[in-house]
Image (cartoon, rainbow, N blue to C red):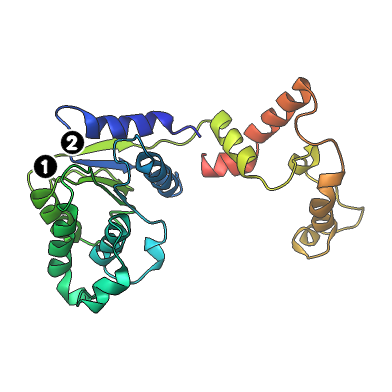
Amino acid sequence: VGRELVLFQVLRCFEQRSARRVVCVHGGTGIGKTAFASFLARFAHTPGRLFHDGVLYDAAWPRRQEPMPWLWLEVAWQILGQSVFEMERNGTQPDCKRKEELISRLCAELQRDRSKRWLLIIDDADGRRLPGAMLEQLVGPLLERTGVSVLLTAKEEYHRDIRGLKVCNLPLRPLDGLSSTKLFLQRVRRPLCREDFEAPSLPEGASASMESTPGSVTSAHSQSSASLGASVGCTAEERKAHMMALLQHPLFQVLGG
């Protein structure tokens, strides 16, 4: 929701005649870079798209400890119909001291089908997982030996060239209020009521500390709010009122989308 233009800009960079090989989508912490990377991966991977069945990305990578080239290899093997177990039995192991060997193996795998277009997505490219020049050391050989395209997400623009290839930087800005509202309504797990956006009144003599106490008036209010009024969407006027209340909610003011 609200990222369609950036999606179009990224794919346009990759498919133009003078196509860019590396694109960096940058934005502040919490802006939605990881969510955008996952969305683009699903979109580009589907049949008929530019990188149909050729996207190297897994949202579980940040939670795993293996070296990045091994994680890229795993996804490539899955796409090519090869068993990770068989590859490990044949001697390919996730050894951190053999990153160059893993990169060479990945290059060989990507060159097996030269008609396929590959896209490697690296989320949090300026994070702790890829310090200093390690990103260029890993991605550089792939760009030199294969036709892979690379999408980076990072907090800041990427100003350095990678093996002579200029990186195209695209900003990821906060969602506008309406897009934030639509996204929130899509993800909410129960009907919203007007009481969800109104501060509950505490009984006379109740202290402010009750707000954070389990079983307090505030807690009980939150648990029962679903049954305290008509849910969102009864009439056009009520929908508009709820949308306006959502736009002013502190959640959207703090997160900026």
Which residue is nearer to you in this view: 155 or 136?
136
Relative vertical location of residue 37 with respect to residue 194 in this rendering, above or below:
below
- Left or right placement of residue 63 versus residue 93 in this view: right
* Circle 1/circle 2 CB separation < 8 Å: yes
Who is closer to the viewer here, 231 or 161? 231
- Distance, label 1 to label 2, CA atoms, is 8 Å
Callout 2: 10 Å neighbours few (<14), some, many (20+)? some
- Residue tagged 2: 20
Spot occupied by residue 51 in the image (x, y as percentages of width and height): 29, 41
Residue positioned 76% across, 43% down in the render: 196
Q: Residue at x 16, y 53 (%)?
A: 112
The quarter of the picture where residue 98 lies is: bottom left
Q: Tag 1: residue type?
A: Leu
Residue at image location 17% in from the left, 69% down from the top = 99
Q: Position of residue 60 (x, y in %)?
A: 41, 61
Report the number of discs: 2
Give the amino acid type for the residue marked by disc 2 in the picture. Answer: Arg
Q: Where's residue 182, x and y in %?
A: 60, 34
Up the image or down, 68 lies above or below 221; here it is below
Q: Residue furthest right?
A: 204
Please indicate whether residue 185 sits to the left or right of residue 47 in the image: right
SS category of the residue bearing label 1: loop
Among the two numbered marks 1 and 2 on one chain, the one whose residue lies closer to the N terminus = 2
In the picture of the structure, the residue carrying the numbered disc 1 is: 165
Asked where in the image residue 97 lies, by quadrant, the reply is bottom left
